Amino acid sequence: MKPQFPANFEDLERSGIGIIAVQGFGMEGLYPLWFGEGSETTPKVIRDACIEALDQGETFYNIPRGRAELRNALKVYHDTLYSIDLHPDRIHVPGSTMLTVMIAAHMVLRPGDHAVIVTPHWPNVEMAMKWAGAEVSHFRQNSGNGKWALNLDGLMAACTPDTKMIYLNSPCNPTGYVMERSDQERLMDFCRSRGIVLLADEVYHRTVYDRNYAPSFLEFAGDDDPLIVVNGFSKGWAMTGWRLGWMVTPKAYEEQMAVLSEIYNTGAPSFIQLGAIAALEKGETALDGLRQSYKESLIVANEILGGHPRIEHTAPEGAFYAFPRIKGIDDGLKFAEGLLFDAKVGVAPGYTFGPENETHIRLCFAMKADRLEEALHAFTGYLDQI
């Protein structure tokens, strides 16, 4: 007899990113623009700290919600960056950033609850909310006047009496949209008034190109506001494979977060946490260097994508993705597969980032500028032939 698994398990499907990537892994001469990571390895100062930790035997269990010295380093980091005094009990390091999203969804959402996702969005976030049993709806950013924008009045109107969570990623994967302080304050006021938890994904907080960091809700929100901020080391410090993130929750939930951290992951590896401390305390120069490299690649992406007649490209303000609309296509997955096999360029089909994105693709430009130029010319060359 077939096992009786629940429908939400039986219905799971691989994202569009995974569908393309599994076909292209190992392809010779591939330009891999599908994942959200650069071509640079983690900076040496961080790697060395991890190696030293391993050599010193840091291979045992530790505090499930994160080593005390890492949580203290995160407090100092936030306090210095944002000129705030973040309460240390609010900081938790249970594992990867995606794990913090899953924990946040299960903290707040129950079957029958409603959540609103600002879209285009990273697909795993929606899966986490649905896995918690919530009904999910989308409110889409719009592109116009050379930038991505969000209609806050429309977002608020999309909430119902059953809405328990709003998800917002700023800077945004995949559009590069950055929410400014005045809009953050309006949205936080709305969430306070309705008792809606705002899940703010700030993992690209240091990947912006006109300032040192993106505006954060932590700069003004109170200790007990209905706010959960998730963040991580993957993007800013080129630590994607390390799988380490953190979250900031309302105060007074230290005990509950310790329990959840233990249930979900028993804590992040100790030696990786010590590498993360080095990232926070010694990685600023490396972070600046990575961001400068991405900025150079962004210039290439804007020039090539913005100059092609079949590509509608809106330059991102943050993160390291382009999310152009391709004129004349109606099946984004089919287009991405053709691009992969005929031009050896791997991109993510737009449909996987939510509704109304079928004619878009996402490509990660966090690649050395000269190599990216080759990849984008291969892309436009393919487009010119179909």
Image (cartoon, rainbow, N blue to C red):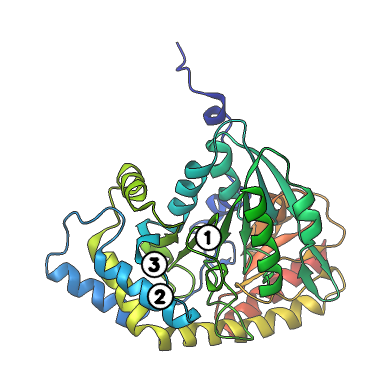
User: Label 2, on which residue?
Assistant: 41
Q: The residue tagged with tag 2: helix, strand or loop?
A: loop
Mark 1 residue element: loop
Please state which of residues 302 and 156 is positioned toward the viewer in this rendering. Answer: 156
Q: Residues within 10 Å of mark 2 (few under 14, many from 20)?
A: few
Is residue 283 found left or right of 171 in the rendered image? left
Q: Earlier in the sequence, mark 3 or mark 2?
A: 2
Residue 347 lies, with reference to residue 86, above or below; the image says above
Q: Bin the neighbour count of mark 3 within 10 Å (Cα to Cα): few under 14, some 14-19, many 20 and up.
A: some
Q: Nearer the viewer, residue 265 or 17?
A: 265
Determine which residue is flagged by label 3: 87
Which residue is label 1 attached to? 27
- Badge nearest the viewer, 1 or 2: 2
Judged from this view, the residue extending furthest toward the left is: 56
Q: Does any portion of residue 122 appear in the rendered image?
A: yes
Q: CA distance from mark 1 to mark 2?
A: 21 Å
Q: Where is residue 345 drawn, in percent x and y? A: 63, 65
